[in-house]
Image (cartoon, rainbow, N blue to C red):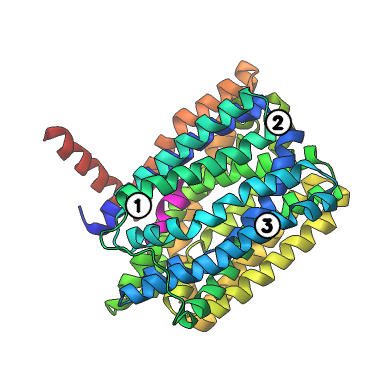
Amino acid sequence: MSKVRRALLFSFLTRYGGMLIGLVSAMIIARLLTPDQIGTFAIASAIVMVISEFRLLGAGMYLVRESELTDEKIRAATGLTMLISWGMGIGIWFSAGPVADLYNLPPVATIFQILSVSFFLAPLISIPAALFTRDFRFRELFLIRIGTSLSSLVAILVLIHLGYTYYALAWGYTISVLVEFLIILVYRPKGICWRPAFRNLGPIASFGIYSSLAGFFRRGMVTAPDMIIGKMGTTAQVGLFSRGLGFIEFMSQILLMGVKPVVLPFLSDVQRSGRDVNQAYIGATVLLGGLVWPILAVASVVSLPVIRLFFGDQWDEAAPFATLLAYWAMFRTVHWFSSDLLVTRGKERLMVIKEGAMFALYCIGIAAAYPFGLIYVAGSFAVVGFIDFLTTTTLLALFLNLEVLAFFQAWITNAVITVLCWGASWLIYDAGKQAFEGNLIAFSGVAGLLPLIWLGCVFLLKHPLRHEVTHILRWCRQKVRS
């Protein structure tokens, strides 16, 4: 198996293992806590998680991208992250009171202070993790992710049982960071020096400021509803909308986050070897779209039974939001790797400008749509997502010479497979509801038949994914024989 395929395998295992544990955790927590309690934590964590995009200042991505890496650069990256992350940790601790007063929610102050602990450990975790990524050591990252996810789940459940409600969620995250640090100590790269250096920080900071700003805007797109709705509405509304958004994020991230950690080092390797990065980008997006688009299309049809099955009927109101948000996620998925492509080609400033403009549109859309109801907020996401898709395509064509016609031609098969899967899921689900008078049985029919329909479409339409499917089947057969 090639280095990239092996990295993809462990990256998939890392993300899927962590997401599976996260799904189990969310299913249990959704039944133990109310929308109001989850909404309270969502408001506080949304603010902290957006701020956290700046705590590393892109040092990890800098280390991954650098063609020649030295101990001095690693120490400088460590020093920069310490300055930024520790300063932010102190700032979050002391801003807890004013933020709680802003939302008139006293528990937010305590949640803020608990979450601030992770900022003081971030430099000692992020630098080794970046070196693992650079060297395609995704086996170690798999062990780290599984360990932290399990520790978070256990801590949250124990603390909820003890009556800590939303505080349990904050402590669970913080405990998982502590566990992550301990595992890093065991698997840290040989020879790594955590002694910081505070010289030659300029190159890292100049790269990192763009990377962090772009990350801030991207994270802000999915956390802005918590902050804006939390201020304009109620914590219960925050909880319901975040559950619908969280469901769609989970469905899309099933595959997106499994591939994402490998893309930047892969495109950087293509760039260093002198091959065509644009063609590699088109090929990567087509492969991913062939998986993600059909999944999101089916999710838009069966959102109600899935949400009820996973989280309980107290979250039924989130289903209509999830249906519209699925279309938003489809537009967003098309250029999911665009930030990695821009970083590889040295266009960080363009990436920040684009992400900032889209973030502003999302915020405006949420605030303008909220008075008409949360369903309009979800609709605004779909509209801005389409604008984002068109804007990104135009920028890549103008500044990176991406062949738009070739790009869309490559995506035709993805669109056909998606339409076929969406239509089949709608017919099966509708027929199942009429025949059995129940959503769960109808959803079971969709879940059982759609993978086969998708697989048939991939081979009949000769989608590039058929080669990957065939390769995986051959590899599995060889493993079984051996």
- According to the picture, the residue beneath numbered tag 2 turns out to be 315
Counting from the top left corner in percent of width and height, residue 197 is at: 42, 74
In what quadrant of the picture does the C terminus appear?
Answer: top left
Q: Is residue 36 left or right of residue 196?
A: right
Is residue 156 located in the magenta-colored stretch of the structure? no
Q: Amino acid at mark 3?
A: Ile
Counting from the top left corner in percent of width and height, residue 79 is at: 46, 70
Q: Is residue 479 left or right of residue 433?
A: left
Which range of residues does the magenta coloring cover? 254-262
Q: Amino acid at mark 1?
A: Leu
Q: Please tell me in which quadrant of the rendered image residue 69 appears.
A: bottom left
Q: Is residue 148 left or right of residue 29?
A: left
Q: Residue at x 63, y 66 (%)?
A: 388
- In the rendered view, tell whether residue 220 sits above or below residue 114: below
Q: Residue at x 74, y 52 (%)?
A: 96
Which badge, 3 or 2, is on the more N-terminal residue? 3
The main secondary structure of the magenta stretch is helix
Element type at mark 1? helix
Judge depth for marks 3 and 2 and give the one in front.
Answer: 3
What distance separates the C-alpha of mark 3 from that of mark 1? 45 Å
Residue sitting farthest toward the front? 195
Question: 339 or 204: nearer the eye?
Answer: 204
What distance separates the C-alpha of mark 2 from that of mark 1? 35 Å
- The dot on residue 465 is 1
Which badge, 2 or 1, is on the more N-terminal residue? 2
Q: Amino acid at mark 2?
A: Trp
What distance separates the C-alpha of mark 3 from that of mark 2? 31 Å
